[in-house]
Image (cartoon, grey):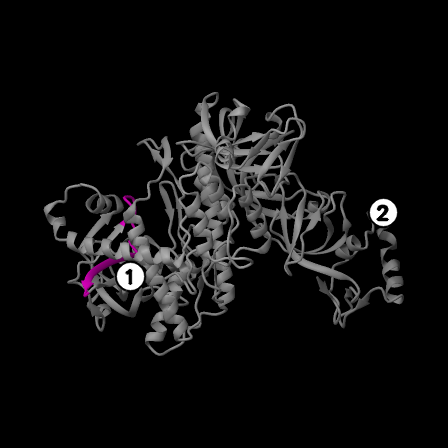
Amino acid sequence: MQTLTEQGVPLSEDALAQLLEVNDDERGTFTRRLNAMEREGEIMRNRKGAVCLPAKMELLRGRVEGHADGYGFLIPDDGSADLFLSSKQMLSVLHGDRVIGREVGVDRRGRREGVIVEVLERANQRLVGRVFVRHGVLFVVAENKRISRDIVVAPGEARDAKAGQVVEVELISQPDRHAEPVARIINVLGNYADPGMEIEIALRKHTLPFEWSPAAVAEAKKLPKKVLAKDAKGREDLRELALVTIDGETAKDFDDAVYCEKRGKGFRLIVAIADVSHYVRPGSALDEEAMARGNSVYFPRRVIPMLPEALSNELCSLKPQVDRLCMACEMDISARGEVKDYRFFEAVMHSQARLTYTQVAGWLYGDAPTLAEDAALLPHLRNLNELYQALSKARARRGAIEFETSEPELRFDEQGKIVSIRASVRNEAHRLIEECMLAANVCASEFLSAHEQAALYRVHDSPTPEKLRAVREVLREFGLQLPGGDEPHAKDYAAVMQQIKGKPYAGFLQTLLLRSMQQALYSPENVGHFGLAYDAYTHFTSPIRRYPDLLVHRAIKAVLSDEAYKPGDWRAIGEHCSQTERRADEASRDVLAWLKCYYMQDRVGEQFAGTVSGVTAFGVFVTLDEIFVDGLIHVSELGNDYFHFDATKHQLVGERTRQSYRLGDRVEVKVVRVDLETSKIDFTPLDANALGGWRKQLRREKR
């Protein structure tokens, strides 16, 4: 908590009135009250005569986080516990605003309660939402449900928008205790169910940059259409090597190419990465755009790239049969999968083929025939496969955690309608490329660390003591232990994963283990990567779509030139890149949730089997088999009983019946409601006794 011991914080008269809880009808005596407080030493004035708070007044600076039900929280900058903000306090702010507040006690639920003293910074200048009309007054309801205030459209500022349409507004006045926020409509996006509208909404709701600045467009136009001789001069020539790209069928930006040959009992691996840093220079308009975006954002059927297509899909993309500039990492790897030596260098390359994971998996692990022009690549691909087997064994010895997860894959027809949702298949070719990229990333981190060049590491800290206690309590019910004491290693997690492999409750425990871990992020402080079991790890292999990778390339080049790369405050840059990554994930989830609702709206009344994928105090979330759609069974649908929520065991337990609903339970449900506006799907259980299939199996095992 910030204690103002040396100097007061100047506040406006309105802020002081609110802080001192002066009612509107008392404002006439406000000045006399201030004078009296100054005489008593309760307040003071600075050199300019502004009223300030004394040292004894403790204030908090932080960010407001709104809730759809109207209340909110003040998230303090100093990391102390959040302050609950009542709906009355939220009248003067919107989600995301930065404020000064103070604690005033606890509410009836025992939460620290606060009041807002001063608004420091407004977070919302533009918003996206839907138009409604009430008593002849147009107002907009924000798509971001954390903004619960209606936004009044100023007279004459409607731009002919109709009720129900999606619009973008610009705020003319911010909210206060006495008035709603007022805005003008600046863009009518269309109707809610128009094709692609879910993406247009997500872009604006999450403030994703999606339009290029004129300066960036001008710079992109000046780029050459192909690699120039002067740009290739002085680089090592890899054009005769059988470097190939291996990506998904729909990929258009090819960051990486690989080549492997046998060297004695070991291997020589070259990972060539697009040299984006040659074209995107620090301080340029393209660099500023890339920094602001932080990463490319991938939606179904649309990508918001970090770089203009002239770079991402053309000049920097390692397309087949054309010369491209690259940064290469050459590694000498033993038969045990251990990197014995490595080096980084600038090069020019010529990809021999654009291959897909499906093709490579079919050639190496199936019986797919190869065309004559591809036959020459097979020896190199077999070398890659041998190397992959060695790297996989090294990964197992290292104890890296390998979670088996499935991502939904949406299929569309020519009219843009979803025809199916199914799990994307991850085959051995995916893992082959992943191991090659991991090896190059580790070399990059070791190279920068050895030369004491600051950079952004991809860090993944170990689980917190609280989460460890919770996960161990659940594991005990299964007769399992998580070794490692207070500081378990990834290999301890991997050992548990191996024990539960093939068990009916494996999915439940894998989810539990995954949720006990912390989120990976970017930081200049190298604390290692817990999940991958690396002491140092960074991102080097995707500079077309991730800004941290571009920074790592620049840092490596600086070391090669005996220079130091200093882009600014590394910590602030890391926090920004971590935030843009989370922003992209949230936007992608929003779009996916809406599309799933759109797909399910014609399936109300149908029955499905599924698995409980989340448990809360208000109900259980179920993921349907095969189509990977999520919905909620509200607690009111669980039967005539009062259910207690056990957060540690991830379960709801009936007070009278003792019927429990737990993470990983199997259930049959009926779809009863689909709400496109909130992207929510509601289920009702068909048979409560169908739940708990894996628990029956566990009881049999214990017997």
In this rendering, the count of numbered labels is: 2
Indicate which disc residue 295 carries.
Answer: none
Dot 2 or dot 1: first in sequence order is 2
The x, y position of residue 568, in whole percent, is: 48, 70
Q: Residue at x 67, y 27 (%)?
A: 656
Viewed as shown, does residue 242 lie left or right of 537?
A: left
Quadrant assignment, res 544: bottom left
Q: Residue at x 21, y 64 (%)?
A: 265
In the rendered image, the quadrant that contains the N terminus is: bottom right
Categorize mark 2 by other alpha carbons within 10 Å: few (<14), some (14-19), many (20+). few
In this rendering, which labeled residue sits more in front, label 2 or label 1?
1
**Distance Cα–Cα, label 2 vs label 1:** 81 Å
Q: Is residue 401 left or right of residue 28?
A: left
Taking the image as drawn, is residue 223 in sight?
no
Q: Which residues are magenta?
A: 247-264
Q: In the image, residue 517 lies at what x, y percent?
A: 51, 52
Residue ID for mark 2: 25
Mark linked to residue 336: 1
Could you say where residue 560 lies in the image, as x and y percent from the top left?
32, 75
Question: Of helix, strand and loop, which one carries label 1?
Answer: loop
Q: Position of residue 58 (x, y in %)?
A: 75, 61
Image: 595 above or below 389: above
Furthest residue in direction left, as rendered? 372
